[in-house]
Amino acid sequence: MIGGRLYAFLRVLVRGFFALFYPIRAKGTENMPGQGPVLLCANHESLADPVAIICALNRPVRFMAKKEVMDVPVLGRLLRALGAFSVDRGSGDLAAVRSAMSILKEGHALGIFPQGSRSWKSGGDFQNGAALIALRSGAPVVPVYIHDRARLFHPLKLTFGTPVDLSGVGARMNSQALEQATARIQGAVYGLKE
């Protein structure tokens, strides 16, 4: 389904909606590889964030979304149509990790919000899940900073950074490697703040 006609149709509709009500201003989209596996890691300000990222890019992106959002009848169906899959936060959801690894192995783009939930403060510590997926898959990690919550008729600004350098991390997959990779990813995302 991802990249198919339904995705393309929904993306056109959503892009039109955002152009009218939440105009997107994206910088650094050239840092996003045009093909092959890539992990997008972004801060999380509002429910509009994944859709804003989808609208800003010219290639399909699948998202890991919390189970509670996927259970909302209309929203959950829309997100599934856009290629999202659920994660049960706080439970060590191995099925979600396997789904993420499969998406990357197939050469797709995957979006994750490593904070684990929306944070309207400046910052918020990242969880280790994105680092685990990055180290296991070897996919490049592109940091994304969303500058503000979506507000009606206000531009929604996104900045895409250069891939995070995870070299020298993960020769041994242990908690120290995960913490180091998480710190690098978090630093790269928050380093894009204007």
Image (cartoon, rainbow, N blue to C red):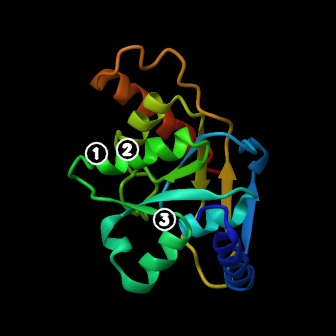
For residue 126, say whether it is visible.
no
Q: What is the distance, in whole Å, between disc 2 and disc 3 at their CAs?
A: 26 Å
Local crowd size for mark 2, using a 10 Å CA cut-off: few (<14), some (14–19), many (≥20) = few
Name the disc covering residue 45, or none.
3
Residue 150 in which image quadrant: bottom right
Q: Residue at x 36, y 81 (%)?
A: 72
Secondary structure of residue under mark 1: helix
Between 186 and 71, the residue placed more toward the observer is: 71
In the structure shown, which secondary structural element does the residue marked by tag 2 occupy? helix
* Residue 145 x/y as whole percent: 59, 52
Q: Earlier in the sequence, mark 1 or mark 3?
A: 3
Label 3 crowding class (10 Å Cα cut-off): few <14, some 14-19, many 20+?
many
Residue pointed to by mark 1: 94
Q: Which amino acid does label 1 sit on?
A: Leu
Give left or right: position of 53 versus 34: left
Q: Nearer the viewer, mark 1 or mark 3?
A: 1
Residue sticking out furthest to the right? 30
Q: Mark 2 points at which residue?
A: 98
Toward the viewer: 19 or 3?
A: 3
- Which of the two discs, 2 and 3, sits closer to the camera? 2
Give the residue type that dot 3 points to: Glu
Q: Looking at the image, is 96 positioned above or below residue 54? A: above
Q: Mark 2 and mark 1: span between their CA atoms?
A: 6 Å
The image quadrant of residue 7 is bottom right
Q: How many marks?
A: 3
Q: Distance between the residues labelled 1 and 3?
A: 26 Å
Quadrant that contains the N terminus: bottom right
Classify 10 Å Cα crowding around label 1: few (below 14), some (14-19), many (20 and above).
few
Work out whether mark 2 precedes mark 3 in sequence or the reverse, and give the earlier one: 3
The x and y percentages for residue 38 are 60, 41
From the top left corner, tell me how far across and down residue 71 is, in percent. 33, 76
